[in-house]
Amino acid sequence: MATAKQKVIYVCTECGYESAKWNGKCPECGEWNTFTEEVREQTKPAAASKGGYSASLVSEMDAVPIDDIDITDELRYDVGISELNRVLGGGLVKGSAVLLGGDPGIGKSTLLLQVCGKLCGKMKVLYISGEESRTQIKLRAKRLGVGGQNLLVANKTDLSAVLALVDSIKPDVVMVDSIQTISSEAISSSPGSVSQVKECALMITRQAKMAGIPVILVGHVNKDGGIAGPKVLEHIVDTVLHFEGDRNYAYRVLRAEKNRFGSTNEIGLFEMRSGGLVDVENPSQALLSERPHGVSGNCVCCTMEGSRPILAEVQALVTKTGFGQPRRTSTGFDFNRTALIIAVIEKRIGYFLGGMDTYINVVGGLRLDEPACDLPVALAVLSGLTDTVISDRLIAFGEIGLAGELRSVSNVEARVHEAIRQGFDCCILPEQCVRVLPENLKKRIRLFGVKNLYEAFAVVRGDVQAEQ
Ligand code: TYD
Ligand code: MG
C-alpha cells in the first residue's frame, strides 16, 4: 500500500526547479526571488513487479507500423477569424491543446469569446471561466454580439469539476479562462502555484487528447512577459500563442511561440475596437497610415513575418545628452543590435553619438527581430542625427556587418513586391540582392543596390542616382 507523508519543498516559479531549501537566486535559470513554498504529498509507489514492469499492461498491438496509422480524421476546425487561423497554421487541430498568454487586459478573453461566437454556429462550445461570473461573460458577449444555444458557459475552478463537466457535456471545443484559476484538491498548494498549474494543464490536455476535443487555455504572464508557471507548461501543450501589444494602442499582435502543427513565424494582427477585435487584413497600410511627412528620423522597413512581408515605420530621435551618460532606448528592436549599429555608425561613417541620447521606436507595437531591419534603423538614426529628411516613398532593408558592409537577406522579391504594392517607388537594398530580382520587377521601382552603410546614406542624401 502507498504511504503518504507531507514534505515542504521550494519551487522556482520561472523554470520549475525544485529545492529542499529556499534560495534567493534560482541555480537553474538564474532568476532572483522566484522561489515559493509548496507542500507535497510524498507517495511511495507500490513495489514494482518483477523486472519493474507488468507484461499484462501491454500487447503487441500497442506499437503499430507508421504506414498503418490513419490520418483521415486529422481535422482542423476553421475558427472563423482569419488571423487566428493563420497563426494556428490553418485552423484549430482536433484534440490539440493551445495555450494563449498575454498581459492583463490585452484581450485574451475577448478573443476567446469571439472564437466561441464563430464556432458555436457549427458546433457545441464550452467556455469555462474561473475569472468572471456568468453575468459578466454575458455582458461581454452582448457587447461583442456573441450568442447562441450551442455556447455553454460555466463558472468552475475545481479541476475534477471541469473534467467531469467536459465528460458529461461532450462539447466539440473547450475554452478555459484561465489555467491559473483552476486548482486540484489532490494538491495542497494554493491555486496558481507551479504544481497546481502543471497538474491542471496536464489533466485537461490529457482529456482533450483522449476525447479528441481541442482545448484553448488562457495563461497569465509574469513580470517579464513569459507565461506564469514553469516552462513545463509550454511543453505540455501543442501550441503556445502570445498576445502582445500596448494596451494604450489599438493594435495587437498574436504570435506563435511554439506550434506542433504549423510554422512559428506567422503573426496575426488585430485591432481592438469598441465591438471587439477585428482582423487587420492589410497590415502594411495600417501600420503606415499615420506616418508624418517631411520629418527627419523616419525610415520605412520591410520585415518578413512568416511568409508575409510587412512594411513598418522605424523612428529615431537623436538629441543632445543632458547628463554625462547618453541615454539609449529601443522599443520594438533589439537593444544590443541598436548599440552595435550605433558603434558601426561611429566607426565607419564617422559621426559621433557619444554625447547624444538615441531613442528608437517601431510604430504600431511591432517587434522587428530580423537582421534585415538593421539598415532602416541605421538610416533612421543617421537621418535623425543630421536632420536629413528621408523620402516618404523610400524603403530600405539589409543586414549590417561590423565593417559597415551590407549583407544580403532572404525573400528579396517578396519585400520589393510589397513595397511596390504599397506605392513606394524607391528601395535601398544590398547590392547582391538586386541580382536575384527578376527583370520585370526592376522596372517597376527604382533600386539602389549598395555595398555599405556609407553608400546607403549617400543615396538618402541624394548624392547618388538610381542604377537601372
Ligand atoms: P480582456 O479580453 O478582458 O483582456 P484579458 O482577458 O487579456 O485580460 O480585454 C479587456 C480590454 O479590452 C479592456 O481594456 C477593454 C477592451 N475591449 C474593447 O476595447 N472592446 C471590446 O469590445 C471589448 C470586449 C473589450
Ligand atoms: Mg481575461
Image (spheres, helix red, strand yellow):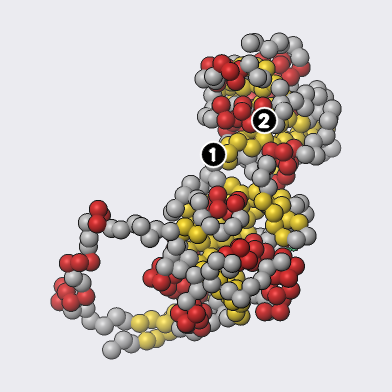
Q: Nearer the viewer, residue 9 or 369?
A: 369
Q: Quadrant of the N terminus?
A: bottom left
User: Secondary structure beneath disc 1?
Assistant: loop
Residue in the image at 41% along x and 71% along y: 211
Q: How many angstroms separate mark 2 from mark 1 (CA)?
A: 16 Å
User: Secondary structure beneath disc 2?
Assistant: helix
Q: Residues within 10 Å of mark 1 (few under 14, many from 20)?
A: few
Residue in the image at 75% along x and 61% along y: 275
Q: Quadrant of the C terminus?
A: top right
Identity, as a three-letter code, of the amino acid under mark 2: Arg
Residue to which mark 2 is pinned: 421
Residue 116: x and y, percent?
60, 66
Residue 324: x and y, percent?
79, 36
Identity, as a three-letter code, of the amino acid under mark 1: Ser
On the rendered structure, is 319 left or right of 404? right
Is there any visible trace of residue 234 in the rendered image?
A: no
